[in-house]
């Protein structure tokens, strides 16, 4: 654990930005490991990607046509097939048929595409400028060149690039393993909830929130301190999310359970709405625990406040910069807490969509982002935008 910010735990609600920082700093990047390309998708480069050799390795044709040398017309002296490893050599007045991507013969002046050629027996006619339609050796990269920095997320194009260069493995920071413990004896998991029962709305959100992590199978834990202790102790994860149990009621067992496991509480409430009772703790063995309030929008805002930075830290990625946008019509500030308000983005401005109460998901379901409205005495006319999906900004501001 990076020690510096941990000591700033104050025992009461911290500001929203401080909470993000604390979660990010508490989450050390996971240990790098070399994995086959097929296992690297969605992880992060632990080391810069360095070109193992020049690419392309030799001069190649960019067209199906004829490699030619000197002024035309040219005598066709052979054909270079895909995969041929001995392209030969041309002298003035000679041509060889080539396919796209094939190595061109030594001495090639240009490649004449098929559609620009008039062929008469063994002779071809046409005009082409010097060096046309040749991909030169080392044009994309030189041996030893740094192509991507450490910390780059490995997406489809990175894997294709690495394969094209001839690499079979990449050294990556693996995806963090995240366990979710959903508490609440009143919860049901299908159908209409009867009187006094509540349909679990947090479990169904988690797969979509955890796409940058490896989500372990969700566990449902009864409202029992001992059962929560056992579940926390047994979770083989880098980060454990616990939903419900975050407040101070008789069925809210998170803090006592953390206490009995010897955890250090790094964040004990955040000055934001919704999401005030969220918590971040570290167990003696280094596993992080985040308490998500039971109210579903509060759980989501807590995930975005604490879990997103923690996952970024474990992945060795930077804490996301949040762009600022004007708020159409403004939003009232809370005097002491940061408000997180569902907004739609239209023409570069944020429009509040309403229905943003702690127990509601209606507003956020139609939102593009949450507006981060700083505490203050007045009305905010601009706000930072918090994406609803880690690593993605679906708007153009
Ligand atoms: N005396 C106090 N009461 C409350 C406080 C407080 O500070 N003192 N804080 C309030 C705030 S703010 C919030 S948010 C909630 C947090 O509650 P908990 O995290 O302890 O969670 P529960 O009490 O179990 O549930 C609260 C609410 O959410 C519903 N819930 C729980 N899990 C789910 C789920 N997976 N899907 C849908 N809904 C869920 C639960 O049924 C309750 O209605 O505490 C306030 N109270
Ligand atoms: O602060 Mo609680 O998280 O909204 O209602």
Image (cartoon, rainbow, N blue to C red):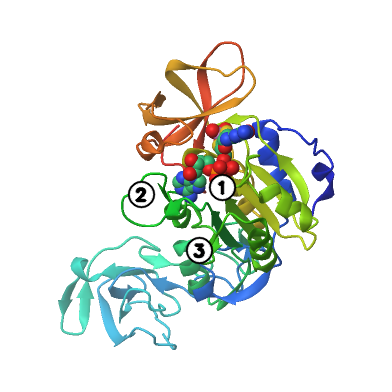
> Looking at the picture, how far across and down is residue 320, in whole percent?
59, 42
Crowding near pointer 3: few (<14 within 10 Å), some, many (20+)? some
Of the image marks 1 and 3, the number of the one nearer the N terminus: 3
Disc 2 is placed on an element classified as loop
Q: Nearer the viewer, residue 137 or 390?
A: 390
Name the quadrant of the N terminus. bottom right
Residue 244 is labelled as 1
Crowding near pointer 2: few (<14 within 10 Å), some, many (20+)? some
Discs 1, 3 touching: Cβ within 8 Å: no
> Looking at the picture, how far across and down is residue 173, in whole percent?
64, 64
- Specify the quadrant of the image occupied by residue 146: bottom right
Residue, disc 2:
193
Q: Between tags 1 and 2, which lies in front?
A: 2
Name the quadrant of the C terminus. top left
Give above or below for 77 relative to 268.
below
Discs 3, 2 touching: Cβ within 8 Å: no
């Amino acid at each position: 654990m990076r020690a510096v910010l941990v000591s700033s735990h104050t025992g009461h609600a911290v500001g929203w930005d401080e909470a993000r920082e604390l979660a990010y700093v508490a989450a050390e990047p996971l240990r790098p490991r070399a994995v086959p390309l097929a296992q690297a998708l969605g992880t992060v480069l632990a080391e810069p990607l360095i070109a193992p050799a020049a690419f392309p390795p030799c001069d190649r044709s960019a067209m199906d046509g004829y490699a030619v040398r000197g002024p035309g017309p040219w005598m066709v002296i052979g054909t270079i097939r895909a995969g041929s490893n001995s392209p030969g050599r041309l002298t003035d007045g000679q041509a060889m048929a080539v396919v796209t991507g094939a190595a061109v013969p030594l001495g090639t002046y240009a490649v004449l595409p098929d559609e620009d050629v008039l062929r008469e027996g063994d002779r071809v006619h046409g005009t082409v400028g010097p060096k046309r339609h040749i991909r030169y050796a080392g044009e994309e990269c030189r041996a030893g060149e740094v192509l991507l920095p450490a910390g780059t997320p490995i997406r489809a194009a990175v894997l294709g690039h690495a394969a094209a260069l001839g690499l079979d493995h990449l050294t990556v920071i693996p995806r963090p393993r995240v366990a979710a413990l959903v508490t609440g004896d009143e919860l049901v998991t299908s159908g209409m909830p009867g009187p006094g029962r509540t349909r679990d709305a947090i479990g169904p959100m988690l797969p979509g929130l955890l796409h940058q992590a490896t989500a372990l199978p969700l566990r449902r834990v009864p409202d029992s301190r001992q059962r929560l202790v056992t579940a926390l102790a047994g979770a083989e994860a880098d980060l454990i999310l616990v939903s419900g149990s975050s407040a101070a009621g008789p069925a809210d067992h998170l803090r006592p359970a953390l206490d009995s496991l010897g955890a250090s509480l790094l964040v004990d409430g955040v000055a934001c709405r919704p999401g005030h009772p969220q918590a971040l703790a570290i167990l003696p063995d280094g596993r992080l625990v985040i308490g998500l309030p039971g109210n579903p929008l509060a759980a989501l805002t807590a995930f975005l406040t604490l879990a997103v930075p923690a996952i970024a830290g474990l992945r060795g990625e930077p804490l996301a910069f949040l762009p600022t946008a004007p708020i159409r019509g403004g939003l009232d500030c809370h005097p002491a807490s940061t408000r997180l308000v569902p907004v739609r983005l239209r023409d570069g401005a944020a429009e509040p969509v309403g229905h943003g109460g702690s127990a509601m998901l209606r507003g956020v379901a139609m939102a593009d982002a949450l507006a981060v409205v700083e505490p203050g005495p007045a009305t905010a006319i601009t706000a930072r935008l918090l994406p609803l999906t880690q690593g993605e900004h679906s708007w153009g501001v």
